[in-house]
Image: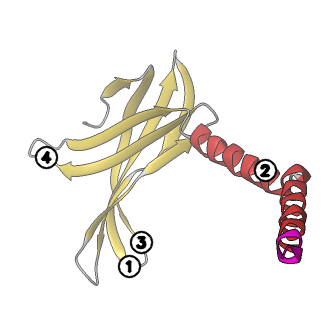
Amino acid sequence: MVQGKEVSVGGYQFRMTELGEYRGPNYLSDRATVEVSRDGKAVTTLHPEKRLFLASGMPMTETALDAGFTRDLYVAMGEKLDDDSWAVRIQVKPFVRWLWLGALLMGAGGVIAVLDRRYRRRVEASTASDTRTLATQEARP
């Protein structure tokens, strides 16, 4: 991706409008500004970074994320290429947040099943009948 160029992914248009160097408390980074639009309307502005930590010399990628109810937008900067362009990973993931909703529903179903009195009554009734059976067997000669 080059500054000023536009890429379309999943019905969204991603345009890198700025690219600059930034100094953080313990790192240097290349920070991009990516404007996201859909059908000509602005959706959000994302700021992915490629950081180089000074103490360790380790490069790290800071992913820009726009979380939504029906989709998540991810933009991550890769490496700088020879022609002043950047390798950029862009992903549009629909309904990712709904996976958590499904897990919460399953957990709630488990809690409801554990709290259901019908299961406890059966255990109590079977324990009482087992006690009577043992008492009857012991009483026989």
Task: From the image, state whether disc 4 or disc 2 is nearer to you.
Answer: 2
Q: CA distance from mark 3 to mark 4?
A: 23 Å
Q: Are marks 4 and 2 in contact (CB under 8 Å)?
A: no
N-term-proximal mark, 4 vs 2? 4
Say which residue appears at 88% left-offset and 69% top-offset: 136
Classify mark 4: residues with Cα within 10 Å, few (<14), some (14-19) or many (20+): few
Q: Are marks 1 and 2 in contact (CB under 8 Å)?
A: no
92 is within the stretch colored magenta: no
Left or right of residue 141, residue 44 in this image: left
Determine the secondary structure under disc 2: helix
Tag 2 residue: 113
Label disc, if present, on residue 98 of the rendered structure: none
Q: Decide which of 133, 27 is in the foreground and name it.
A: 133
Tag 4 residue: 81
* Above-or-below relation of 25 to 136: below
Determine the secondary structure under disc 4: loop
Tag 3 residue: 24
Q: Are marks 3 and 4 in contact (CB under 8 Å)?
A: no
N-term-proximal mark, 1 vs 2? 1
Q: CA distance from mark 4 to mark 1?
A: 25 Å
Residue found at the very far left of the displayed protein: 82
Determine the secondary structure under disc 3: loop
Instruction: Please name the amino acid that badge 4 sits on.
Output: Leu
Q: CA distance from mark 1 to mark 2?
A: 51 Å
Q: CA distance from mark 3 to mark 1?
A: 6 Å
Left or right of residue 54, residue 103 in this image: right
N-term-proximal mark, 3 vs 4? 3
Label disc, if present, on residue 26 of the rendered structure: 1
The magenta-colored residue range is: 136-141
Q: CA distance from mark 2 to mark 3?
A: 51 Å
Percent across and percent down for residue 84 are 16, 44
